[in-house]
Image: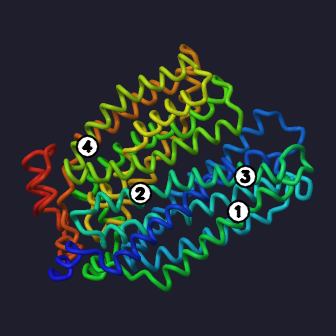
Amino acid sequence: MAATAERQQETLGPHAKSAIRGAWLGFFVDMFDIYLPIVVLAPALIYFVSPDLSPAATAIVGGSIFAATLIGRPIGALIFGHYADKIGRRRTTIISVTGFAVGTGLMAFLPGYQQWGIAAVVLFILLRFIDGIFLGGEYTAASPLAMEYSPKEKRGFYGALIMTGYPLAYATISVLTLILLQFIPAGDLNSPYVQWGWRIPFVLGSLMAFGLVFYYVRSVHESEAFEESGGTESPLKELFSGQNLWSFLQVFVLMGGFWLTLYTASAMLPGLLTSELGLSGTRLTITLSIAFLVLAGGYMAAGVISQKVGRRPYLIANAIVMATVGTFLYYLLVRSAPTNLLVIILLVTAIVVVVTAPWGLTTTYINERFQTGVRASGFGLGYSLAVIPPAFYAFYQAGLASFMPFKYTPLPLLLIGALLMLVGAVWGPETRDVDFQKDASTSPDAETPGTDDLARNSRSVSGSRRNTDGS
């Protein structure tokens, strides 16, 4: 095992390359699927709702379709994280990807309100919920598999590379929708895009997922760290006990901040660009596509910098920058309401990068916080469960709007999110030098196996806690 670890540190072997490539492809397809109802279905939502429905009610339906997927993801992380830690990352990934490949394909052929009435949108929401469960299983299994194959000295880089699947998928689906609308017009209920054009990206998403299943079956091997550990009989029981529980709570706080700040950039900002700056759909798509393409570079920078300076210092510094620079840029954009598209693109890109670039570190950092026996469960649940409180951001905005202009409501939420990130980062230890190979060779029944390096590098825990980590 030691020889294997040395070889991985020297070069990236074919098994490692396949695992990392598979995790990137999986996250790309995952994010592509997530934003289908937000981007692709938005011009065709009237296909699924009654023509007599008010605009507000229609917006609620659209939000429910998206929310159903978000609710399903933590459930998927719970289910598939258990099996990824028990039977293996590779098999669990294959099962979960097959599930959402089928689900997305079924959505492409759904009838609308004209044919099935309200049952059409109810079935759509149900399928999105089930889809979310399988989507939650994909990254829960595939990302730990890739991280366990990544050399310790380059985990930051490869973790960030996997995370670029999000901005690249968002930009891809936005551009694809824009192109489709040029050739397949949207309009009233009988327009080509509303009747069948929206189905094309859904079919494409399903085909990509089936292709990913084939790739994993043929090219990806099980994690050597997992095989060495032999799996864990009761991963969830171990996750929510002892030092693992403290690690989970710290990650939950940190990710709560990540999710809340993300929504200010990915959910609130587009609405403000339309309502306050008057951007058309085309200009909005161009602006966000450029911003998210640049963000992919920001993710890579986050991974590389954290590999040099450490995860903890990077997270602390970025939380402070986000609370100061990010909030100021957001305020400047909303307050000045520029009309020049180039100025808007520059400001929006700067906001998106400052607020969202630290996400490039999440896959690496969360996987480093948990030992092999509970890594998939800890990563999946730590990543997904924290999305629930921030998911009610619209209600928080409504409450804030009672005593401040609505256009400024993202600012206090951005500050609160940055504060949560700061608390989570200060609470947690340094993880850059955690040795996954040592971790795997330790009994999974131990309370915190393989965390000697983590304990030595911790700057935030007490001496007694460091002793526990090193036990």
Q: Are marks 2 and 1 in contact (CB under 8 Å)?
A: no
Hey, what amino acid is under mark 4? Tyr
Residue in view at x 18 percent, y 67 percent: 435
Left or right of 349? Residue 464 is left
The mark lying in front, picked from 1 and 3, is: 3
Mark nearer the viewer, 2 or 1: 1
Would you name the residue on which mark 4 appears?
314
Residue 42 coordinates in the image, percent (x, y): 73, 45
Question: Which three-letter amino acid code belongs to the residue tagged 3?
Answer: Ile
Residue located farthest toward the top when viewing the structure as drawn: 403
Q: Secondary structure at mark 2?
A: helix
Measure the alpha-carbon separation of dots 2 and 3.
37 Å
Image side of residue 220 versus residue 455, left or right: right
Which one is earlier in the sequence, the residue at label 2 or at label 4? Answer: 4
| Foreground disc of the pair 2, 3 | 3
For residue 307, what is the image quadrant? bottom left
Q: Which residue is mark 3?
A: 179
Amino acid found under the numbered disc labelled 1: Phe
Label 1: how many Cα within 10 Å (few below 14, some 14–19, many 20+): many
Q: From the viewer's side, name the closer residue of 288 and 225.
A: 288
Q: Residue at x 53, y 21 (%)?
A: 408
Say which residue label 2 marks: 381
Foreground residue among 177 and 5: 177
Q: Position of residue 355 (x, y in %)?
A: 42, 37
Label 2 and label 1: CA atoms lie apart by 27 Å
Q: Secondary structure at mark 1?
A: helix
